[in-house]
Each structure stands twice: as C-alpha cells, then as structure tokens.
Image (cartoon, rainbow, N blue to C red):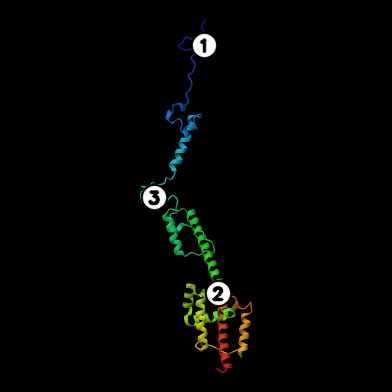
Amino acid sequence: MAELFDLDEPGTGEGQEGKAAPQETRSWFESVPEAYREVPYLQQFKDKNFDEFVKSSVEAHKRVGGAVVKPGPDATPEELERFMNHFRPKSPDEYELKLPEDVQIDPEVLTKYKERMWKRGATPEAANEAMTMFTELYTQGQEALAKEAELKETAAREALRQEFGDKMAEKIAQANRVASRFGGDDFAKAIKEKGLHLEPSFIKTLATIGASLTEDSWIEGAKTSFGTSADIQQKIDAIRHDPNDPFNHENHPLHKQRNREVLDLYDQLTQREKAERGL
C-alpha cells in the first residue's frame, strides 16, 4: 500500500532518527580580530546582538562628526577664526555686559574691552565673568584707597591739633583763605591731588602767611560789623562750639562758605583789636 507521507528525508532515504543536527550559530563578536576584542567600546557589546552594535556606532559617529575640534599649533589664521566663530557672537557689539548699578565705566573703555574679548574668541558668558571680576577688583581697590585716605587725613588732623591746639580752626581758616585768595580753584585742586592738604607743615606755612598778611592789612574785605572785639570773639566761639554748625561738618554743603565767614571774623577781630589799642 502506498504511503501518503514519506517519513524519510528527501534524498536521504532516512527517517527522523537519522536527521543531521543543526550547526551552532557563532556570535558576531567572534569574528572581531583578537587584537581588538579587548577594546572597552567593543567589550560592552560582547553579549549583545550585532544590530545594537551597529546602531550605537552610528550614533557615536554622528556625535563625533558634529564636535568642534580645537585647531592645532600649526593652524592657519583662517582655521582659528572659524573655530572661534563657534563660541563668540557675530560682532563685538553683540556682547551684553551686565555692570553693577554703582559702577560707571567710560563707553570708549567698554568698546575696547568688547573688541579684545571678541578677538580672543570669548563667549558672552566668559566676557561677563571677566567684567564682573574686573569691577569687583576695581571696587575693592577704590574702597582701600578711600580707607587709606581717611586714615591719612585723621592722622594729619591729629598732627594739626598737636601743632596748633585750640587755634587749629583759626589756622586752617587762614590757610584756606590764602589758597583761595591767591591760588584759586586750580591751586586748590593741585594741592589736593598732591596730598598737600594733609601735610601739617604745608598748612602751617599757609597759615603763617595768612596771619602775616592779615596783620599788615594786605587781605581786603575786613569789616567790623559786630561791634567790639569781644562781640566778634563771642561770634567766633559760638560758631566753633556749635556742634550743628556747618563749620564743624566737613561734608556739609555750606562748610566752605562757613569757613570763609569765620576767617572774615578773625580778620575783623584783628583789625578791631588794633583799633581798640589805638594802633
């Protein structure tokens, strides 16, 4: 009787019992040359399929291909320019610097700063960071200078007190009068720039000149509008001992004017005393 289904494999004449065993599938990793099998990047795909390896390799290539590579030491100026263009703005004017409200910088200086930052390929963040550091150092320096000037002025005033005692205000007024009457604003500015207004010997010299000129009536404007010498002296004492008077507050807007008024009073006192003595 003919069999509908032949149990033998086609062409072999054997049954299932004699079927050859399928060959074992080799891992793709085994095809990698031994010299490269220990590479860390390949090791992570050792137990994964080939598709995962290919996908990861393609993505890595995309990342590396889009990376900005720093030019080497032999790079041309054009290559350096192209490299810096990846980081800096299109022009120096596009840097937006954030300055503290209490810091004022000359616009021309800021323009030169931006040009220098742009030429060096600085990012906007780096340019702002550098400016912040600069303004902080500048402010600290100014504060240190102000403190030093304050200490120097305090020491100078103490030296003047030691030198003139109770007549310190009178002597300073005389020195200011000489500087103002014969030197003017330019002279006064030069004195401050050189720090001479804090030198006791310089103040003493001007005060001596002022006293001698007053005694010889070389300084004009002496008026006796307060009666006797005692009246004038009383007016001077009232001003000097009044803690709220502008004369006793150097930062008061009327301090300089009050100084001139006190000096006028001293001139009047000198003239009145001479008159009372019949000189």
Q: Residue shown at 35%/49% (left/top)?
A: 76
Q: Residue shown at 39%/50% (left/top)?
A: 80
**Up/down of 204 relative to 83, above or below:** below
Relative placement, left or right, of 231 versus 202 is right
Find disc 3 in the rendering and name its residue.
80
Q: Nearer the viewer, mark 2 or mark 1?
A: 2
Q: Earlier in the sequence, mark 3 or mark 1?
A: 1
The image quadrant that residue 169 belongs to is bottom right
Q: Earlier in the sequence, mark 2 or mark 3?
A: 3
Tag on residue 185? none
In the rendered image, residue 266, in percent from the top left (x then y), is placed at 57, 85
Q: Amino acid at mark 3?
A: Leu
Find disc 2 in the rendering and name its residue.
159
Q: Amino acid at mark 1?
A: Glu
Q: Amino acid at mark 2?
A: Ala
Q: Nearer the viewer, mark 2 or mark 3?
A: 2
